[in-house]
Structures are given as structure tokens and as C-alpha cells.
Amino acid sequence: MDKIVKIRNLFFGYDEKMVLEDINLDIHRGDYLGIVGPNGSAKSTLLKSILGLLKPQRGSIEIFGRSIKDFKEWGRIGYVSQKATSFNSSFPATVEEVVSANLFPKIGLFKSIKKEHKERVFETLKVVGMENYRRRLIGNLSGGQQQKVFIAKTLISEPEIIFLDEPTVGIDVESQGEFYDLLERFNKDMNITIVMVSHDIGVITEKVSRIACMGDKKLLVHNKCCRVPFSEALTRFYGDRMNMLVHRH
Ligand SMILES: Nc1ncnc2c1ncn2[C@@H]1O[C@H](COP(=O)(O)OP(=O)(O)OP(=O)(O)O)[C@@H](O)[C@H]1O
Ligand SMILES: [Mg+2]
């Protein structure tokens, strides 16, 4: 199977304090990997390391067969960061402009946005139910609405792998359902690889093909087909708090 991400013996610490120790992980094309773990277990740190935003102290990270240090094909990767929404109301861009920014690698920065590009933006906003807000200033939208625009922005560049860090925080339950259905379609129909950090254990255990549990600076991967139930593996990391979260098949 086509390996998209390969992590070997990764160590990362902020200043002297290590938060990731000896992490090994392979992500294959078509995977839908859920990453779970308590607050502060370095889930976001791991994503940022994979994306080259943080430099590990030791170990190697390859993406699409290249060391992250030399990687340049950023159009192949989508990233929705944790709390991506921090615009204030004076931020001078419309929803349409924010989303079309990710079309520029394809259309060239100095060419005008053509009708077909506007249609692409419209169709993508429609996917997240935000097409009627396209002329509004991004800063004037609610947090959940801004998050949906960010997801549209990520999707429009047609990435081969998408990293999402708690993407549904602040999104209402109905929209969350639609959003997870959407991710499932991307994964199953378009073979887009998905890596999602979430505290929503019920959804994670239902939707993903593999789960990475993080805690105590370590990472453990469980395949959905394996005999040890996810819930049992998760309990080791979450302790008693898992009781109210256990998902049964
Ligand atoms: N910029 C930073 N400088 C110093 N320490 C940091 C920094 N960012 C994160 N940390 C620390 O590193 C650890 C891991 O943080 P991280 O944000 O990766 O956790 P997380 O698993 O994503 O948590 P959450 O579920 O709350 O999002 C935490 O102890 C955090 O306090
Ligand atoms: Mg985080």
C-alpha cells in the first residue's frame, strides 16, 4: 500500500520538556486515522510536526516519500488547525476571497478569478452550507460559520491528505453530522486520506479505520479489525473517564 506519512523514532519537546517520545507511525493512502487522547497529550504537537511547523529534536518524518525538511508540494496537503477561527470583525476579506485564496496555486496569483473559479468556490461553499454567506466579511461570522469556511478553503485545493485538529468544535450537532458524512464520502469515494484529532470518541470509533491513542508521551495504533475493542484500548489512556464515553457496536 502507498505510504503517505512515515514517522520513525520521533522525539519532540518544547524547551527542555519532552512531550513526544519515540513515536512511530505509518499512514497509508486511503486511511481514515482518528487521533485521541487527553488534553495536553501532544496531539496538536504531533500534527504540527508532521506538517513541518515544528522541528523535532530527534527522529525522521517523511511525507509522500520525502523528508519533511525538503517537502514543497503543499497543495497535496490540507490542514484545518485547532481553533482556526480567530478573525476579528475588521478582517478585510470576504468568505469568497478567503476560500479562493487556496485556488491561487492552480490559477496563478496575478490572474483574475474567472467565472469557472467563482463557480468552484460556490460549489465548495455549498458543500459546507455557506454559499449564501459568500459576500460577507469573514470577521463578521460566528465561530462555527468561520470554521465551515475554513473547511471549504481546505477542500477547494483537492488535497490528497487532510489533517483536521478538532474540526467540529463550535459546530452545532446537525452540521457536525453532515460534516462527518462529508469526510466519509471524501475518504471512501475519492480515496482522500484523513487524519482527524477529536475528543468525540463515539464518532471516532464509528467512522475511522484506525485509531491512534496518545498519552504519556507515547502513541499506540489500533486497527479497527483487531480483536481488542477500541473502548478497552482507550480506557488505558482515559482511565475511568472513559466509562461515559464508551461506544458499543
Ligand atoms: N508553544 C508551546 N510552548 C510550550 N509548551 C507547549 C506549547 N504548545 C503546547 N505546549 C505543551 O505541550 C503539551 C502538548 O500540547 P498539545 O497542544 O500538543 O496537546 P493536545 O493533545 O493537542 O491538547 P488538547 O486536547 O488540549 O488540544 C502540553 O503540555 C502543552 O502545555
Ligand atoms: Mg490540541
Image (cartoon, helix red, strand yellow):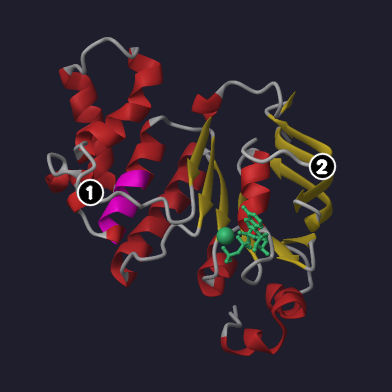
- The number of numbered badges drawn on the structure is 2
The quarter of the picture where the N terminus appears is top right
Q: Is residue 31 visible?
A: no
Measured from the top left, where is residue 68 in percent x and y? 70, 29
- For label 1, the SS is helix
Residue 25 screen position, x and y as percent: 77, 47
Which of the numbered marks, if any, corresponds to residue 57?
2
What is the CA distance from the residue labelled 1 to the residue labelled 2?
37 Å
Label 1 or label 2, whichever comes before in sequence order: 2
* Left or right side of 134 for 20: right
Residue 145 is inside the magenta segment: yes
Above or below, comparing residue 156 to residue 201 in the picture: above
- Callout 2 amino acid: Gln
- Can residue 208 be seen in this snapshot? yes
- In the rendered image, which residue does mark 1 sit on? 139
- Secondary structure mostly seen in magenta is helix
Q: Tags 1 and 2 in contact by the CB under 8 Å rule? A: no
Q: Nearer the viewer, residue 99 or 209?
A: 99
Ligand 2's image quarter is bottom right
Q: Amino acid at mark 1?
A: Gly
Residue range (magenta): 144-150
Residue 92 shown in magenta: no
Q: Viewed as shown, does residue 121 lie left or right of 132?
A: right
Q: Is residue 27 left or right of residue 111?
A: right
Q: Residue at x 53, y 74 (%)?
A: 202
Pointer 1: residues within 10 angstroms few (<14), some, or many (20+)? some
Is 128 situated above or below 107? below
**Residue 48 in the image: above or below residue 240:** above
Q: Residue at x 30, y 46 (%)?
A: 149
Residue farthest to the front, as pictured: 15
